């Protein structure tokens, strides 16, 4: 590899205190075959422009904080190799469908609220005493939801979802997949509570099964599949609500 | 929070990714399938109406190269819709055998293509016997 080779990065810049509109700034970065786009951005920040703002942490596709648009495609920048773009330039932008805080950093608050809305934790009507040991689960029961538990909250799926960009009420791929993950967990008893949330307005029905969330997911969670399954579950609950007395159907509370 | 930059809505979003375009094509197939159903319903109406002349006249009015083309387009649209639908079924209705999930191509055959071909064969047999 020739270390004198370089690659051009065109980066979205926006500093709210000085810019009323974003602009693009070009940087020439040394080309290194085993570098990822995140390495190039870090190199710019360390050597050229310390004011460039971006999020990252693990550099190994685990923390989910380095998601950006790379040539228009939602990507974990720590998993996007320069060699896959070289010798062409690379355009880096903050994830679409989110408001931009600064440069490549987006506002995650709405996403965090949506995650909380689906109650992503095990809900029990009857809590066992710790002396009774853990709630046991068979490998077959684990298989029912394991795929949906692999989400790293990188929000690439929201950037790939045309509905998430247009419909605020829609909970979005990651949040719905996470809700479904708990609904499918044999130890959980909070399905009715979660389905109440999902059935409201466009929360789940906003999804038209475009399916691109699944295409871009770096962890193969398949949010699109989870959402269709959750829709079927929600529809069943909804119709059960007509035939069953209140308290056993959709609106089942913590104590039934 | 103030100072944030909000990017504008993209009206032509369906051109941005091949997946979006394929999605729109799948959605638009409904017009062709719907159009075909209208023709079929009118035909059934004429048939049920009893008058053989009315049916023959109607059938004559919907033949010819343009109508044939329209029917072919509707057929392609219906097949495309069916194929994409069967492709999506394993995602929406996973089948587990113990710890293992039935692979998508097999699930598509079990839940989609298999029953489809079976029903088609039964109808063909019933019509042609
Ligand atoms: S830096 Fe952690 S996922 Fe990329």
Image (spheres, helix red, strand yellow):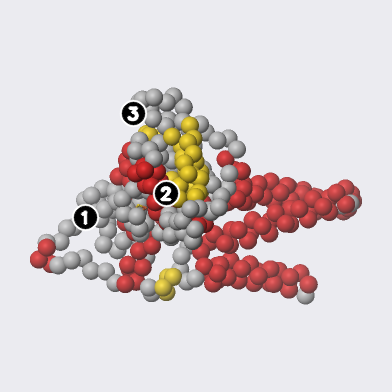
Name the front one of labels 1 and 3. Answer: 3
Q: Is residue B127 left or right of residue A48?
A: right
Residue at 61 percent of width and 68 percent of height? B113
Q: Is residue A158 left or right of residue A254?
A: right
Q: Depth check: B12 or A143 in front?
A: B12
In the figure, A109 relative to B72: above or below?
above
Q: Looking at the image, can residue A243 be seen? A: no
Mark 3 lies on a secondary structure that is: loop
Question: Is the residue indicated by label 3 positioned so its CB lies within 8 Å of ligand 1?
Answer: no
Chain label for disc 1: A
Q: Is residue A126 left or right of residue A76?
A: left
- The residue wearing badge 1 is A125
In the figure, A254 relative to B115: above or below?
above
- The residue wearing badge 3 is B1
In the figure, B85 relative to A28: above or below?
below
Estimate the spatial distance between the alpha carbons at disc 1 and disc 2, rounded to whole Å: 51 Å
- The residue wearing badge 2 is A40
Number of numbered tags placed on the structure image: 3
Residue A129: percent from left, percent from top: 11, 61
Residue A60: percent from left, percent from top: 35, 58
Q: Same subunit under labels 1 and 2?
A: yes
The mark nearer the N terminus, 1 or 2, is 2
Q: Depth check: A55 or B45 in front?
A: A55
Residue at 49 percent of width and 47 percent of height? A70
Mark 1 lies on a secondary structure that is: loop
Chain label for disc 2: A
> How dense is the environment of label 1, judged by Cα within 10 Å: few (below 14), some, or many (20 and up)?
few
Estimate the spatial distance between the alpha carbons at disc 1 and disc 3, rounded to whole Å: 39 Å
Mark 2 lies on a secondary structure that is: helix
> How dense is the environment of label 3, judged by Cα within 10 Å: few (below 14), some, or many (20 and up)?
few
């Amino acid at each position: 590899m020739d270390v004198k080779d370089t690659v051009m990065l065109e980066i979205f810049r926006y500093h709210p205190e000085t810019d009323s509109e974003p602009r693009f700034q070009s940087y020439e970065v040394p080309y290194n075959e085993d570098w990822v786009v995140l390495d190039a951005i870090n190199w710019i920040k360390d050597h050229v422009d310390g004011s460039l703002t971006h999020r990252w942490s693990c550099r190994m596709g685990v923390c989910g904080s380095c998601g950006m648009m790379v040539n228009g495609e939602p990507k974990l920048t720590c998993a996007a190799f320069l060699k896959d773009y070289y010798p062409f330039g690379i355009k880096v932008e903050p994830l679409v469908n989110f408001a931009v805080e600064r440069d490549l950093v987006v506002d995650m608050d709405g996403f965090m609220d949506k995650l909380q809305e689906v109650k992503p934790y095990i809900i029990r009507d009857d809590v066992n005493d710790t002396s009774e040991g853990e709630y046991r689960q068979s490998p077959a029961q684990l298989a029912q939801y394991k795929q949906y538990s692999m989400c790293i909250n990188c929000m690439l799926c929201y950037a790939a979802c045309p509905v998430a960009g247009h419909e605020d009420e829609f909970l979005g791929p990651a949040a719905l997949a996470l809700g479904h993950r708990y609904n499918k967990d044999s130890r959980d008893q909070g399905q009715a509570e979660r389905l109440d949330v999902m059935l409201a307005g466009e929360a789940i029905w906003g999804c038209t099964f475009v399916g691109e969330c699944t295409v871009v997911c770096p962890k193969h969670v398949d949010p699109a599949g989870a959402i269709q399954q959750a829709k079927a579950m929600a529809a069943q609950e909804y119709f059960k609500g007509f035939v069953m007395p209140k308290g056993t159907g959709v609106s089942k509370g913590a104590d039934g | 929070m103030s100072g944030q930059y909000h990017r504008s809505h993209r009206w032509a979003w369906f051109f941005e990714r091949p997946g979006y375009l394929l999605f729109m094509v799948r959605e638009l197939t409904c017009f062709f399938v719907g159009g075909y159903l209208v023709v079929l319903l009118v035909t059934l109406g004429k048939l049920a109406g009893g008058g053989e002349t009315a049916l023959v006249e109607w059938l004559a009015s919907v033949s010819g190269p343009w109508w044939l083309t329209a029917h072919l387009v509707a057929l392609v649209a219906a097949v495309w819709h069916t194929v994409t639908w069967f492709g999506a079924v394993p995602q929406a209705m996973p089948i587990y055998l113990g710890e293992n999930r039935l692979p998508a191509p097999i699930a598509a055959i079990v839940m989609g293509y298999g029953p489809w071909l079976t029903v088609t064969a039964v109808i063909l047999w019933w019509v042609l016997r």
